[in-house]
Image (cartoon, helix red, strand yellow):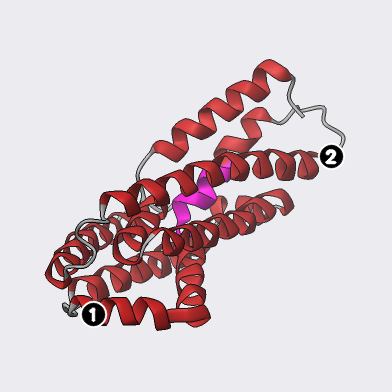
Amino acid sequence: MPDLPHLLAFIAAGWLLNLTPGPDVLYIVANSLRSGVRAGIVGGFGVLTGCFVHIFAAAIGVGTLMATSAAAFTVLKYVGAAYLLYLGVRMVLSRASPPADLQEAAAASGQRGLKEIFLGGFWTNVLNPKVALFFLAFLPQFVDVGAPSKALAFIVLGLIFISTGTIWGLGTAVVAAKAASRVRQSGQAIVWINRALGGVFIYLGIRVAMLETR
């Protein structure tokens, strides 16, 4: 574990990185705007669960393999890009529903709808090669070279990062949901929100596909 000054620097850097917009933040915002704060929070927890995969992968060396193997990086890159493009196209092609239908759909969505939102957030994070390389490049800077168990240090720092990310994700979901509370009952407004966010997802998918292989 780093000493207190380095730990505080790590937390501050983590906050700044969480503030950087990307597929994860956009996914939380999109679900909050379309379906309310609960959907945004569930999507956020899906994203954060995906972070656990990257943390443990980096701790056991899979992350190193991804960074040094062009084939592994390329596969994950294109799978992640395809998933973002799929989300974007689906949102762009969505249609309007009458306000009454939206209320009924929200009431009837139940566990299955939230499960899909959670899994969507999970895969949005797991299939993003930038996240894998971020954990591999960022966390080692705060791990003491003399640490008896570097894997454990990776995991502890990763859990700290996830804790701060949880606060940011929940706050983002609440703010986005409140901002959309006046337009969520309008089916046409939902369509244009979906199209705008879908366009950003498509852009991010293209950006991911164009990442250079390490």
Does the image show residue 127?
no
Question: What residue is rendered at 57% in x and 39% in y?
Answer: 164
Q: Nearer the viewer, residue 181 or 166?
A: 181
Report the Cα–Cα distance between label 1 and label 2: 57 Å
Q: Is residue 64 visible?
A: yes
| Left or right of residue 69, residue 144 in this image | right
Q: Which residues are magenta?
A: 125-136
Residue 83 at x, y percent in the picture: 37, 70
Residue type at mark 1 is Ala
Residue found at the very far right of the displayed protein: 148
Say whether disc 1 or disc 2 marks the residue closer to the N-terminus.
1
- 127 part of magenta stretch: yes
Which residue is identified by label 1?
A: 100
What residue is drawn where x is 20% and y is 75%? 99
Magenta segment, principal secondary structure?
A: helix
Residue shown at the point (41%, 65%) measured from the top left = 80
Judged from the image, the secondary structure of the residue bearing numbered disc 1 is helix
Whole-percent x, y for residue 29 in the image: 34, 54
Q: Are marks 1 and 2 in contact (CB under 8 Å)?
A: no
> Residue 149: which disc?
2
Residue situated in front as seen by the camera: 37 or 145: 37
Image quarter of residue 88: bottom left
